[in-house]
Amino acid sequence: MIFIVLFFLAFSLLLYVLLGGADFGAGILELFSSKTNQDITKKTIYRVMGPVWEANHIWIIILIVILWIAFPAYYKVMVTSLHIPITLMLLGITLRGVAFVFRHYDAYEDKSQYVYNWLFRVSSLITPIFLGMIFGAMVSGEISTKNTTSFYTVFMAPWLNVFSFLVGLFFASLCTFLSAVLLIGEADEEGYPVYVRKATIATVVVVILGFITISYGYFSNILFIKGMLNNTLSLFLIFLSALCLFPLWFFIRKGNRINSRIFAGLQVILIISVAIVPHFPNLLITKETSLNIFENSAPESVIRVLAISLLIGGSIILPGLFHLLKSFKLIKILEKE
Amino acid sequence: MENLDAARLQMAFTLIFHIVFACIGMVMPFFMVVSHKKWLNTGNPIYLKLTKSWQKGVAIFFVTGAVSGTALSFELGLLWPEFMEHAGPIIGMPFSLEGAAFFVEAIALGFYLYGWDKISPKFHWFTGIIVGVAGVASGILVVSANGWMNAPSGFDYVDGQFLNIDPIKALLNPAWFTQALHMTLAAFTATGFAVAGIHAYQVLKGKQKELHKKAFKIAITFGAIAAILQPISGDISAKDIAKRQPVKLAAMEAHYETSKGVPLYIGGIVDTEKKEVNYKIEIPNALSFLAFGDFNAEVKGLNDFPEDEIPNVAMVHYAFQIMVGIGGILMLAGLFFFFTNKKRKQWMRKNFFWKLFVFLTPAGFIALEAGWIVTEVGRQPWIIHKIMRTKDAVTPMPGIVFSFYLYVFVYTVLTVAVAWLLARQIKSLNNSPIQNV
């Protein structure tokens, strides 16, 4: 039963990174665009993400609920030590969500659009950086579960460090990359070359930041990176990911909207696997110990009910979501080229 | 400020905000689908215009409800990690089902908002129904989790350990039904009167009168029916509280001395030092009857509970009085509307009729927040009734007061922004002509 729960945990994480990530990336793309391209992007993402923009962000609620129900000890360490970055991330999610709706549902288009646009773009950049920093903090081994030391060591140091920040930047660049690849297939004549160019740049940035993050982690003796580089399976996955960069690059340059998406999604799956595989089932690495999720899970009766709820919920939600995406022609693979 | 007080204030503040937005987001879809149905049936373009304006309102409230809800799902742990570590798995079921219901709502809303002219009209209308039903289901499930804090069940508590967890029993805790019924009716009452009040004001202003009158009628019908049913639900709740949380009942009534044939106090100033209530109106034997259905029943007073298990009596008592008082007024207003609509149509041409409902615009929400204060402050000092104290659940992180200020700032700005946006919606609605379809 616990494997059903873990499957849904991984599945929600993947969908949040893919869908929510592309959403964040759209805002970042807008931030780093010229005035004309900003307007094109704004229109395109409203059309592409409008019907699903809220659904994309519910995956994080599903994630967090699964965490606290099934792995309460893990959840407790996270919300206690990482209180500050989580609060800042929530601030980003809040401002981003309302800015998106305000800019499309305000009855008048006037100067206030300026505020909504900038709020949307800036929070789109900040939120994934904090999300990445939170993940970085959970695996870098800086969290201390002994509550005896100073405020800085317990509540700041775990996330306010170079490694976490690099992970944050890496995640933000990954979001931008996903969004650019997604938009290649969605843009009209005018926007098409713009996104091909941006996807190319984003790919280069992701690879460079990934390399810097891993190198920094290796030279600063971060357990997570060391473990990753000493594990055959994760090394193989990194190799595979590097290999897949070639077809990805090729399809982006050709502007192939379906294959570029498939390879972009594959990269994300590989990256998440590389992050989880080497230390599994220890998903949280603290100064004192690693939290093994099997040993710290909720009692069997809870896991059983949760697994059944997830199966029922999933069997209602996933077809509904699929139908929604299909009805608004958001899945290009289903259409004829 | 103490960390515990700051954490409690932040939780209270976020919930005060979230409750308003969530209730509107939950109830307004029903108004929207009624108007939509009337458009489908009559082809009257006014209904189409009304539906489309309401759907914008729904979208704005849905997003504010959704983001404040996302924040809350984290805040529970950020502020009360000790509580969530133990309670999280036990009350996981309502939360996971709520997550699913919320997801269904978001998907259905995607269909509804973007489906005009793209999907079949009947299916399109039906997705609006799903939005409403899924919203109400989410509300009920969240209230069930809160019910568990008042009536913890589905586990054995042995030496500080939660053993033999039964999540289904926890979901169906003894408080879930009374609380969910009361809250759902309150949401319909508050939103119905608030929306009706806003449209009544527009009728007085005289622009697009026909549209605003139709909008008023739809909203007030929901609000009035809920307000008329609410006292029945209140009575069920009172009897339930009397059995389950006698200390909360005693605090609601500021009832200090255990006695038989206890009167019901209306109004009054609570003197917590002398443990008495001054300047009140007494209805003899009424509390005994309301709580136990017997005019001579014994009601346990606050003096017979341990000092450290008593909530803030004055606050609970005043909040209770406000809730019941406004609830009564809204019930009468609801009856007045039905009477006018059936027997005295001519009153609807007079200003006093509309002014009355403009005056009542915020009333439902004031009562709703007061009621929430009764149940939450009345539960103190416990976070899990008789199991875990609130002070033992709070986060060890110091300086929560800064996080509290941040939330106050952000949510105040948000509230102002949403109000401003709605005002602009109404302005644009009044200034654009109705097109024939």
Image: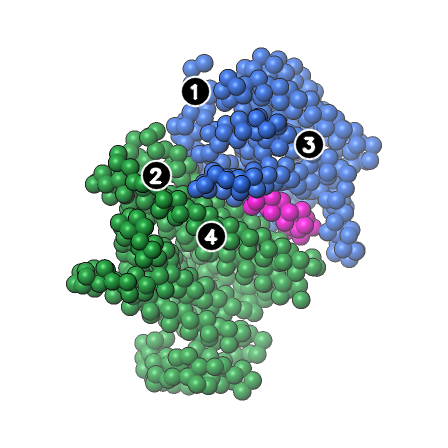
Chain colours: A blue, B green
- Residue contact between numbered discs 4 and 2, judged by CB atoms under 8 Å: no
Q: Within 10 Å of the Cα at label 1, are there few (<14), some (14-19), or many (20+) other Cα atoms? A: few
B180 relative to B84 in the view: left or right = left
Q: With respect to residue A34, does A297 lie above or below?
A: below
Check disc 3 and report its element: helix, strand or loop. Answer: helix
Disc 3 and disc 4 in contact, CB within 8 angstroms:
no
Q: Which residue is mark 1?
A: A334
Residue A174 seen in this snapshot: yes
Three-letter residue code for mark 1: Leu
Q: Main secondary structure of the magenta part?
A: helix
Q: In which chain is the residue bearing label 4?
A: B
Give the foreground label among 4 and 1: 4
Say which residue label 4 marks: B419
- Dot 1 or dot 3: first in sequence order is 3
Looking at the rendered structure, which numbered label has been put on residue B127? 2
Mark 3 → mark 4, Cα distance in angstroms: 38 Å
Nearest to the eye among marks 4 and 2: give it.
4
Q: CA distance from mark 3 to mark 2?
A: 39 Å
Check residue B45 for magenta coloring. Answer: no
Discs 4 and 1 lie in a common subunit: no
Q: Is residue A165 above or below residue A331?
A: below
Image position, residue B380 (x, y; %): 54, 69
- Which part of the image, by quadrant, shows the N terminus of chain B? bottom right
Three-letter amino acid code at disc 2? Answer: Thr
Q: Secondary structure at mark 1?
A: helix
Q: CA distance from mark 4 to mark 1?
A: 42 Å
Q: Which residues are magenta?
A: A76-95
Say yes or no: labels 4 and 2 on the same chain.
Answer: yes
Disc 2, SS? helix
Residue displayed at 31% across by 53% down: B206
**Gap between marks 1 and 3, in whole Å?**
31 Å
Residue assigned mark 3: A170
